[in-house]
Image: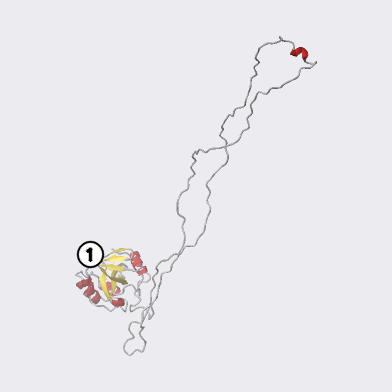
Amino acid sequence: MITTDQVQALLDGDGTVVGRDGEKLGSVGQVFLDDRTGTPEWVTVTTGLFGTSQSFVPLAEGTADGSRVTVPYAKDTVKGAPRVDDSAGHLSQEQEGELYRHYGLADPSHDEADRTDRTDRAQTGGAPAGAQGRDTSGPTTDEAMTRSEEQLHVGTERVERGRARLRKYVVTEDVTTTVPVSHEEVRLEREPVTDANRDEAMSGGDLTSEEHEVVLTEERVTVDKETVPVERVRVGTETVTEDREVTEQVRKEQIEQVDGGEGSDAPRPDARR
């Protein structure tokens, strides 16, 4: 059972009627309600070039999903339905009976009082807003069409583009430096014998053989290493702004004169934009 809330969704969006085996029958034109129960009872399917033809389809066995309504009928059955003038916005008991017979459905029984009330569809209380005149080329609309177009709205969102890591590793390099080192060398110092040092000079034998040893020293280079902190490195970020072009397709409707009609001097456009 299709509810009035589902009907509103069909009328608010680009409603589509789908038949048996998923075959598209056409677009939703108008929805007619039973004034006695307030339940959706009929939907008109707009078919033909520029939506010039409408066929009535019963909703008793239909289901709705968003802007799509599914009925258990083939396209030929819907197109072959009796043509009913819906300009008055209601169906008579005779018109409904003819439609029920076409679709092989039993005409719901109503008493005489109900039959009078039941003729009105989607014009009395309980009808969802916009149920009448949904089809811009239908008989209940004025002589104007509404042209719509898509508008492009471009924004930004922040997403992850990559990650940066710090990694510490050890490298070896050669360091060359100059260190001054010293060493001792032998140097002979000759001192002449004088009256002042004669006693020390003549303290030994007259002629002797002897040796005298002197220890020589030198400095050697030593190397010692220690690990010391030299700097701190951290990862920071900065925001860089650049311009990027965005290209996207948008659709828009165009309205043109299709046929000026007999006796009309209105020119026919030579080209379509």
As drawn, 181 above or below 23: above
Q: Residue at x 22, y 64 (%)?
A: 21
Colouring method of the image: secondary structure
Q: Residue furthest top?
A: 205
* Quarter placement of the C terminus: bottom left
Give the residue type at disc 1.
Asp
Between 156 and 149, which is closer to the camera in this rendering?
Answer: 156
User: In which image quadrant can residue 206 be found?
Assistant: top right
* Quarter placement of the N terminus: bottom left
Task: Give coordinates of residue 187: x percent, y percent.
Answer: 68, 23
User: In which image quadrant can residue 103 be found?
Assistant: bottom left
Q: Residue at x 24, y 76 (%)?
A: 95
Between 234 and 92, which is closer to the camera in this rendering?
Answer: 234
Which element carries disc 1, helix, strand or loop? helix
Between 53 and 233, which is closer to the camera in this rendering?
Answer: 233
Q: Does residue 52 appear left or right of residue 173 in this picture?
A: left
Q: Does residue 196 appear left or right of residue 91 in this picture?
A: right
Please name the residue that numbered disc 1 is placed on. 21
Q: Residue furthest front?
A: 207
Specify few, some or many for label 1: CA neighbours under 10 Å numbering under 14, 14-19, or 20 or more.
Answer: few
Task: Give coordinates of residue 177: x percent, y percent.
Answer: 59, 36
As drawn, 82 above or below 195: below
